[in-house]
Image (cartoon, helix red, strand yellow):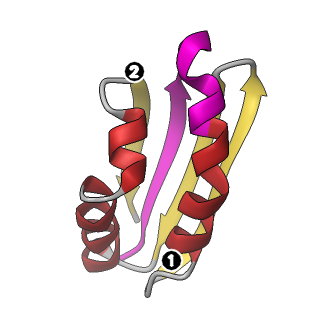
Amino acid sequence: MGVTLTGTLTCPPERVEDLRAALPDHIRLTRAEPGCEAFDVTETRIGVFSVSERFADRAAFDAHQARTARSPWAEITRGLPRDYAVVEA
């Protein structure tokens, strides 16, 4: 059963440059993960990032969550508002 996450990540102006700088590496590492079928993060407005992820199954999604929790991305985005929906289908 696949897992899809969609939503937004919002970043205040004083942190947006750091987030933009870290984003390419975060995308590259995530897309290389086993079970990652799609991963896109796009800045739709200044400081507002649309997030779309699809993983083959719950185990792949959980592994992604565990990896990112220990990553530089977690530090850069700590405390930022996220409005995500996760669906298993």
Callout 1 touching callout 2 (CB < 8 Å): no
Magenta highlight on residue 62: no
Residue 87, above or below 59 = above
Q: How many marks?
A: 2
Horizontal and vertical percent position of residue 78: 32, 32
Q: Nearer the viewer, residue 55 or 20?
A: 20
Q: Which residue corresponds to the image point at 38% horizontal and 52% vertical from the top-left? A: 72
Give SS at disc 2: loop
Name the amino acid, label 1: Cys
Q: Which residue corresponds to the image point at 76% horizontal and 20% vertical from the top-left? A: 45
Residue 46, above or below 78 = above
| Magenta range | 1-19
Q: Which residue is mark 2?
A: 81
Q: Which residue is mark 1?
A: 36
Give SS at disc 1: strand
| Labels 1, 2: front one | 2
